Image (cartoon, rainbow, N blue to C red):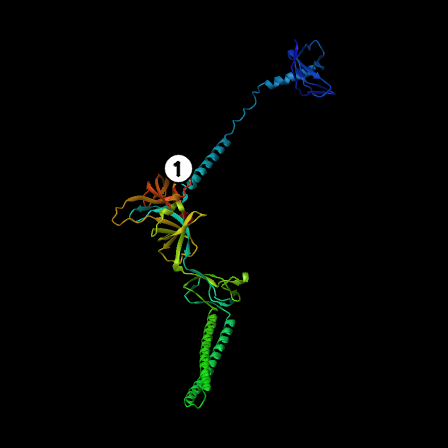
Amino acid sequence: MLGVVAHAWQCQPSVEAGDSCHWPVAAAEGKLATVAFRSNPFLATGTAESDFRQLGSVTLAGHTLRPAPSGYLMNTSAELLKELRIDRKAPPAPPPSRRGLWTGLAIAVVVALLLAAGWFLFGRDKAIEVSTAPTAAINAGTTSASVLDASGYVVARRMATVSSKITGRVKEVLIEEGQRVESGQVMARLDPVDADAQRRLYTSQLYASRSQVNGVQAQLREAEANATRLGSLVKQQLVSKSQYDQAIAQRDSLRAQLVSSQRNVQVAQDQLSIAGDQVDNTIVRAPFAGVVIAKAAQPGEIVSPLSAGGGFTRTGIGTIVDMDSLEVEVEVGEQFIGRVQPKMPIEATLNAYQDWKIPGEVIAIIPTADRSKATVKVRVALDVKDPRIVPDMGVKVSFLEAAKPAGAEKKNEGVRAPAMAIVSRGEADVVFVVGDDDTVEQRSVKLGREMGEDRQVLQGLSAGESVVLNPTEALKDGMKVKMAEDAAE
């Protein structure tokens, strides 16, 4: 029989003898062959057959094959047979324990129970926090619809920056921001030194003019008496005619001087009056009743009605506003100005007080346009006078349709709902209505015209129902909700 050597060997050494290693190789008739080499382990290629009974060694692929020693073969066969023997005297192996299996099942059950309890306590019917707003009915006989919305500002028709009539140094300021002043009330005083000196000068000039008048009057009386006496003597031809003429000329000259002196007295009186006005101009008074909104000067500063002093000169003491003259100015686009008419009712909403609706009417449409903005200015009067309304506040104005006559038939025009409550789901406009059990119901609605920040809902809602504002995508029909104020508590 031939010993068959495999096509390739990846062997591990079994016996080391010097620098030769022997690997067992399967051969015919139960014999073993070894491969001896004198280098690193190799991977032999090729196939060969040899009769190991006849040959003491065989050379294959440059390597020498020779039979393994007989003792080695017998020991190996005995060990292999021993491993195949069944030991019937050995005790049977104990069955595998199931304690680990039952422990794992118990842990799994406990975890499942904990998850179920957590879902029951925290996940079941968890309410979503929402904000709501009620809907209101729109009745044709009581509520007018908005035909146009515009934005503007609160302005004062009577507002003044109060200044002095003369240039001077501020002595004292008697106002503060927010203070209410009456007409004629003193707001500030300037240093009156120069004005007082001018008034004293004109007073002295007046006294001098009056003294001059008295002197001329005395001279005139003497001249008149002299002229009368010489007139009698001329008739008696006791004096010459020339003397009489001189006396008459002297009298007439003194009469002219008296008139001039009297005119000088009048001039002095007028100058003194002007000087008194200059002193009075050092006192700054309020031109009308109002509220101080700005204090522009401090004691020691120079004020002037003209801006001739540069940055070191103030042009005013303060600014006051007549709060009874407040109105609203809005700018309406040219393409919509045809919807606005004088005496048209309006509803104003201040940006600072969104829930406060202020009635009013259109005062006038200013007959000019702003070419840069393509707008027309409209003046609007407010029917309410309230200290919360202050100048330069932002305001939204809704121009309303004229109210229908009292005898006209009233027609239900749907409800008014916040525009923030209306969202799109697919191709439909829907709202979420909060029920008595704090669950939401999704409803499809039919929309009408815009009404400022609200929308007219023709179908799908009733007056007084609460709708969710700004509903999210996570909100679904039938879900539990809670009010934002309840969550805050």
Q: Quadrant of residue 233?
A: bottom left
Residue name at image x 45 percent, y 38 percent: 115
Q: Secondary structure at mark 1?
A: strand
Q: Is residue 483 visible?
A: no
Q: Nearer the viewer, residue 433 or 123?
A: 433
Q: Is residue 147 left or right of residue 294?
A: left
> Which residue is nearer to you in this view: 472 or 309?
309
In this rendering, position of residue 319 left or right of residue 415: right
Q: At x 51% / y 32%, what residue is drawn?
A: 100
Could you tell me how many numbered marks the image carries? 1
* Residue, far left: 407
**Relative to residue 341, is residue 72 depicted above or below?**
above
Q: Position of residue 330 (x, y in %)?
A: 40, 51
Q: Residues within 10 Å of mark 1 (few under 14, many from 20)?
A: few
Q: Position of residue 357 (x, y in %)?
A: 36, 52
Q: Tell me if residue 163 comes above or below residue 361 in the rendering.
A: below
Q: Is residue 376 above or below residue 301?
A: above
For badge 1, the amino acid type reads Arg
Residue 25 visible in the shown view:
yes
Measured from the top left, where is residue 483 in percent x and y?
39, 46
Report the front residue among 356 and 143.
143
- The residue at which mark 1 appears reads as 425
Q: Quadrant of residue 75?
A: top right
Picture coordinates of residue 274 (x, y %)? 46, 71
